[in-house]
Amino acid sequence: MTGDGYTDLVGRKTDGTLWLYPNNIERDNGVPYSTPDSREIGHGWNGFNSII
């Protein structure tokens, strides 16, 4: 998602918002997803159970 070559996570919260959790493994000393970089990237996803 972020284009840096590392796998990021995308998740949907119960309110239907879509969130990006970027993998910052290099910046975070080998611990991916450890900083609060998550951000909302969409809304209205209540009707979806999976993203393919």
Image (cartoon, rainbow, N blue to C red):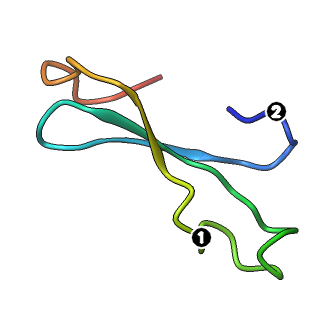
Element marked by disc 2: loop
Residue 31: percent from the left, percent from the top? 71, 79
Q: Quadrant of residue 48?
A: top left
Categorize mark 2 by other alpha carbons within 10 Å: few (<14), some (14-19), many (20+).
few
| Residue 39 relative to residue 14: left or right | right
User: For mark 1, what is the residue?
Assistant: 35
| Residue 2 relative to residue 21: left or right | right
Q: Earlier in the sequence, mark 1 or mark 2?
A: 2
| Circle number at residue 45 | none
Q: Quadrant of residue 4?
A: top right
| Residue 19 relative to residue 37: left or right | left
Q: CA distance from mark 1 to mark 2?
A: 18 Å
Which residue is found at the position 87% from the left and 68% from the top? Answer: 26
Is 16 located above or below residue 4 in the figure? Answer: above
- The answer to which of 50 and 31 lies nearer the viewer is 31
Residue 49: percent from the left, percent from the top? 22, 29
User: For mark 2, what is the residue?
Assistant: 3
Element marked by disc 1: loop
Which residue is found at the position 87% from the left and 42% from the top? Answer: 5
Residue 22: percent from the left, percent from the top? 63, 50
Amino acid type of the residue that numbered disc 1 sits on in the rendered structure: Thr
Categorize mark 1 by other alpha carbons within 10 Å: few (<14), some (14-19), many (20+).
some
Which residue is found at the position 47% from the left and 22% from the top? Answer: 52
Q: Quadrant of residue 41?
A: top left
Viewer-side label of 1, 2: 1
Which residue is found at the position 79% from the left and 68% from the top? Answer: 25
Amino acid type of the residue that numbered disc 2 sits on in the rendered structure: Gly
